[in-house]
Image (cartoon, rainbow, N blue to C red):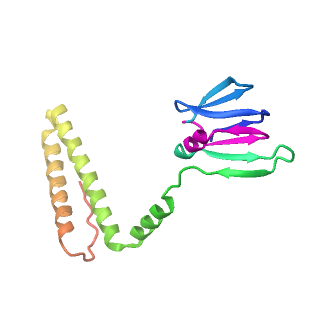
Amino acid sequence: MSTLYLDRKDAALDVENGSLVVRLAGAVATRIPLAPLERIVVHGDAVLSSRLLAALWQHDVGLLLLSSRHSEPMARLVGCPHDDAMLRLQQYRRAIDADACRLAGRRIVAGKLAGAARLLDRALAIRPDRRKPLRDAAATLAALRHRVAETETAPDRPRECVHYQP
């Protein structure tokens, strides 16, 4: 988390070309890129441009203004709101939906089998001396891939685990 603390009295903050510009007595004191910032804490009197406030919101940079006397929070700006809560709710709903879980499981297994088949294809090109065991393994994978593809269209029913023994 990168936080910028500004405690210069009478500083003026603005934004130019994606950078925070800090001016002291009218002269540019520093420029800081907004991209790595997560929050800015301003302690004391400072002038903030409306352009800066809009840029902070768009870049999801929080702003906390503290009073000059007691360092108490006086105002706060939070960045652009996320849809994290809605996303998490959808994920939880899918996690407890048995059909969605079975479909996700099938897709994961199908992806793993496809990756293993690609690996065997590359191995065949590199090791022609091991053609028989590699082709046998590829045939077994092809049968398993076909079985997984069939179960995506078939109605769900409990199945026994199938263990592959070389």
From the viewer's side, name the closer residue of 39 and 114.
Answer: 39
From the viewer's side, name the closer residue of 124 and 85.
Answer: 85
15 vs 11, left or right, is left
Query: Which residue occupies 20% across, 47% down?
Result: 117
Q: Quadrant of residue 32?
A: top right
108 vs 67, left or right, is left
Q: Is residue 69 above or below residue 152?
A: above
Q: Is residue 53 above or below residue 26?
A: below
For the magenta stretch, what is the residue range?
35-56
Q: Quadrant of residue 147?
A: bottom left
User: Residue 99: x and y, percent?
Assistant: 31, 72
User: Residue 44: x and y, percent?
Assistant: 79, 40
User: Residue 166: x and y, percent?
Assistant: 23, 53
User: Residue 159: x and y, percent?
Assistant: 26, 73
6 vs 145, left or right, is right
Query: Which residue occupies 31% across, 68% down?
Result: 102
From the viewer's side, name the closer residue of 163 and 61.
Answer: 61
Q: Is residue 113 above or below residue 96?
A: above
